[in-house]
Image (cartoon, rainbow, N blue to C red):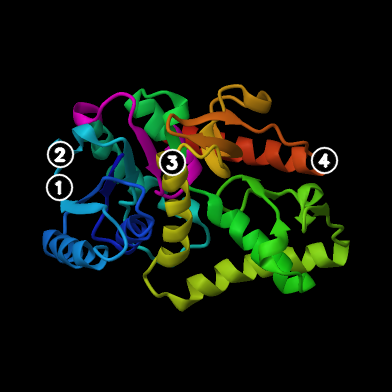
Amino acid sequence: MKLGVIGGAGLLGSTTAFCVGMRDVLEEIKLLDLKENVLEAHVMDMSQALLPVSKTKVTKADYEDLGDCDIILVTASLPERQVANRNEYLTGNLGVVTPICEKLKAVCKKDAILISATNPVDVFTYVYWKLLGWDKSKVLGFCVNDTLRFKWAIEEVTGKEFSKLDAMCIGEHGDGQVRLYNHVTYDGKPMEISQEERTAIEEATANWFRTWQQLDSKRTTGWTSGVMLADMIEAIATDSKAVIPVSVVMDGFKGYDHVAMGMPGVFSKEGVTKLIDVELTDEGKAQLDKTACKIEDMLKSIDM
């Protein structure tokens, strides 16, 4: 398979390209960006760095070169800045996404798979689907970091070993995420988490984002997100059937329409063709209902 990365000169695009290139699961990675000198430097450097470990080819490309790409990753967005939450990027990033969709629609094959990392992710998953007109199984939004940080917070609070924890977030990539405490396991067995521990876990994840914003580093979480995006891409390229949280157009799933949200999805070479219908507590269902309304309101605000 071939991967095209729009925003390939940026931290997230280039890091993801390198991470997935290291796994030797792709024939070629094509990098696109407006910053051509930085892009060329990445291509020159990455091409040599991968030689000892991978047969994946890294090239500089333009939109017309994406016609044979099986996967398109879009990391392009407005520059990072201090925000209270990711939804503050909505209006500005709409101006980035719309022309990208026009160009992709003109050059890409219809069965290509698009992965969006543009914030707010769930809103733009729906926007890409509407503007491109592609099958919903092939328009995916990146939200795995919420699950990663949920597991990280459980480890921090309980002292349990991260590698033995299994947990998941669904809903919004952001404040509207729904943590599935009723599905947390440790070493394959259900794990009870007290209310006191839950409060500490919620505070840990909230404080993490607040601290990150206060640093005002003008950078995204390139390494964390790059590794997680590489997991998604590898699952598609290898037809692995791995279950990974992903933002998808709901289209009636669990009773939700006109919205995209994070759900556990089965990844294959066709995209995400199956969603896992996880059991929700009454509290979880109420949280998810609230999140769906929030995302739908944001879509209405941009006439989607």
Q: In this view of the protein, which residue sits in the foreground, 63 or 69?
A: 69
Point out the frontmost of discs 4 and 1. 1
Q: Which residue is mark 3?
A: 238
**Which residues are drawn in magenta?**
105-126
Seen at 41% across and 52% down, the residue is: 89
Q: Is residue 295 left or right of residue 160?
A: left
Q: Which residue is mark 2?
A: 65
How many residues crowd around disc 1 within 10 Å: few (fewer than 14), some, or many (20 or more)?
many
Tell me: residue 252, above or below residue 41.
above
From where the camera sits, is residue 243 visible? yes
Q: Comparing marks 3 and 2, which lies closer to the viewer? A: 3
The mark closer to the camera, 3 or 1, is 3
Mark 4 or mark 2: which comes first in sequence?
2
Q: Position of residue 88 (x, y in %)?
A: 45, 54
Label 4: which residue?
281
Please state the horizontal and vertical placement of residue 211, each as a whole percent of the image. 55, 74
Q: At numbered mark 4, what does the secondary structure look like: helix, strand or loop?
A: loop
Look at mark 1 in the image and give the residue it sits on.
61
* Whether label 4 touches label 1, CB < 8 Å: no
Name the secondary structure under disc 2.
helix
Q: Residue at x 54, y 37 (%)?
A: 241
The residue under label 3 is which amino acid type?
A: Thr
Tell me what residue is drawn at x 17 percent, y 65 percent. Answer: 38
Q: Are marks 3 and 2 in contact (CB under 8 Å)?
A: no
* 3D distance between C-alphas at marks 4 and 2: 47 Å
Amino acid at dot 4: Thr
